[in-house]
Amino acid sequence: MDRGKKEALVAELRQTFDENELVVVTHQSGLNVAEASDLRRKMRDAGARFKVTKNRLAKLAIEGTKFAHLTNDFTGPTAIAVSVDPVAAAKVAVEFASKNDKLIIVSGGLGEKTLDVASVNALAKLPSLDELRGKIVGLLQAPAGKLARVTQAPAGQLARVIGAYAAKN
């Protein structure tokens, strides 16, 4: 690879580190094309990305970013999962790693905080931003639904009483 391509790759990786909130460092050894494509598709569906990295170039790119504390984790057959959502990449990576022993979670970074394997697993169990937004919308809509039922209940009861009285006569 010539110098220009390496510089472009480092710039792209630096942009990736700058734009995302979560980085999960993994070792992927022996993933075939179908498995890697499946993992990338799942990441894309969740709003995350999965990228195989060259360690030397990744170390250059991560310098000076909020994920600089992960520099020493770039050894061996490394790949990164990244997402803006602080849960998405971890959720997909942990789920995939639990079903496929060719992907191993090494560490993670949530902004400037370093995450060990247990922390990445715990993070993966949290609901994503979209799930939380859905729950909040549900909570906001629930009082309106309850209010409508409460205001309709007395009229319904009155109608039943009148109907019962009419049926009696």
Image (spheres, grey):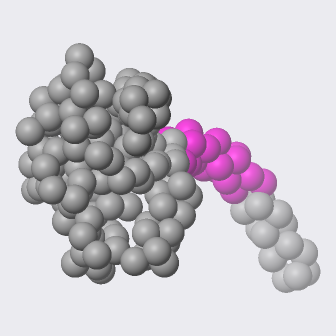
* Closer to the camera in the image, 56 or 127: 56
For the point 15% across and 56% down, which residue is it?
76
Can residue 24 be seen from the camera position used here?
A: no
For the point 65% across and 49% down, which residue is it?
145
Left/right placement of residue 145 relative to residue 138 reads right
Q: Residue 21, position in %: x, y?
A: 35, 32
Q: Quadrant of the C terminus?
A: bottom right
Left/right placement of residue 169 relative to residue 13 reads right
**Residue 126 sits above or below residue 41 on the image:** above
Q: Residue 138, position in %: x, y?
A: 55, 48
Q: Residue 126, position in %: x, y?
A: 30, 53
Residue 62 lies in quadrant: top left
Residue 104 lies in quadrant: bottom left
Toward the top, the furthest residue is 64
For the point 57% across and 42% down, which residue is it?
137
Magenta span covers which residues? 134-155
